[in-house]
Image (tube, grey):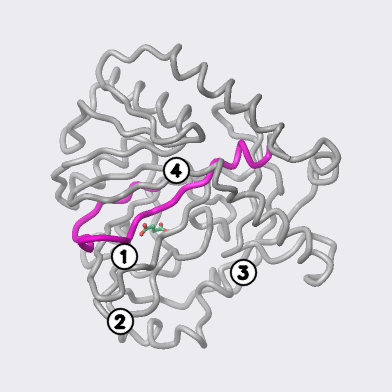
Amino acid sequence: MYAGLRAPAAAHQQQVHLMELKTISIKPLTAAMGAEISGADLSAPLSPEMLGEIKAVLHEYLAIFFRDQHLTPEQHLALARQFGSLEVHPIVEGKGGYPEIVEIVKEAGEETQFGDAWHSDNSFMDCPSMGSILYAREIPPIGGDTIFANQYMAYDLLSDGMKKILDGMVCIHTAKQAYDPIRLAHKYRGETNMKYKYSEAVDKEVEHPVVRTHPETGRKSLFVNKMFTTRFKGMKPEESMPILEYLSQHAIRPEFQCRFQWTPNAVAFWDNRCTMHYAMNDYYAHRRVMHRVTVEGDRPY
Ligand code: SIN
C-alpha cells in the first residue's frame, strides 16, 4: 500500500541536500515537509538575499518556522508585506487598529478553537490566501500545536486512475458551515474575543479546481479541505461525499505531515497553495493567543 511513497519522498530529500544557503540555516522537521530556520531576525527588513533564500526554503519545505522573534504588530505586518499584499479577513474582525491581523484567541475553559479542522486558509475566497504568517503571543504550557500536511504528496500518491478522474474536476468551496451565523451567533453578536462580521462572503460559493498547479513551482497539489469544500461541481452533496471523504482522509496521512510545537514568540509561515493545517484543541484549561496575517493569493488553476 505504501510502495508509492518511496519515489516522491526520496526526490524531496535529494533536493534538500542540493540547496546551499548563505544567510540562514535550516533543520527539516520530517521527511514530508517543514523546516525550522535559524539566523533570521524577522523584526528588521530582510536583505534581498535572505528574502530570496526564505522563499526558496518555503517552496521546498512548504512550512517554515522561526523561534524567538520579537515582533510588534507593525513589524509583523511589515514582515508579511515583503511576501505580497495583505488581506483583511472578510468575516473575522481584525485586531483593534490592525485590520489585517486576525487575533486567534482561545480562553481557558473555552471549548471551541479556531482552525481545529483540516483546511487551507480562506479557500472559500475567489483568490484564497497564498501564505499565512502566525505569531505566538501567548501559548499554553503544553498542547496547542499546529499540524501540517503536504498536498503535493497527497496528489502524487493518488493512483493514476484517481488522478485521471480528478484532473479537470471542480469543487465548490464556501465559508457557510465554518462561519455559520446560527451556530456561532454569539461571535456575530460580538460576545466573544474573536468577533465575526456578517457579509456576503459567509454564504458565497466559489469554484476551484480539485487539483491545482502551484504558480511558482509548477507542481500539482490536491486542493480540497473538510472545512470549506462541500461538493463537486455538477454533483449532489451525497454523490460527492464518498469521494470527498476518501480524499480528506488520504490528504492527511501521517506520512505527509509535520507538527510544530510552539514556543513563546515563534513564527510559522506556510504556503496554503500546497498544504493544509490543523490547530490542536487539547489545552482546555489554558489560554492561547496567536496573531495571524495572510498574504493575498491568486485564483487557483
Ligand atoms: C489557523 O488555522 O490559521 C490557525 C492555526 C493555529 O492557531 O495554530
The residue tagged with tag 4: helix, strand or loop? strand
Q: Residues within 10 Å of mark 3 (few under 14, many from 20)?
A: some
In space, the residues marked 4 and 2 are separated at their CA atoms by 31 Å
Q: Which mark is residue 258?
A: 4
Label 1 and label 2: CA atoms lie apart by 11 Å
- Answer with mark 3 or mark 2, whichever residue precedes in sequence: 2
- The residue to which callout 2 is attached is 192
- Residue 220 % position (x, y): 66, 34
Of 77 and 288, which appears nearest the observer? 288
Q: Using a 10 Å C-alpha cutoff, classify the residue at mark 1 as few (fewer than 14 neighbours), some (14 to 19) or many (20 or more).
A: many
Tag 3 residue:
204
- Work out whether mark 4 precedes mark 2 in sequence or the reverse, and give the earlier one: 2
Q: For the residues labelled 3 and 1, say whether their Cβ atoms are less than 8 Å apart.
A: no
- Give the mark nearest the N terminus, 4 or 1: 1
Q: In terms of image quarters, where does ligand 1 lie?
A: bottom left
Where does the magenta region start and end? 132-155
* Quadrant where the C terminus is found in the figure: top right
User: Which amino acid, mark 3?
Assistant: Lys
Residue at left offset 17%, top offset 42%:
69
On the image, the x and y values in percent for residue 38 come to 23, 29
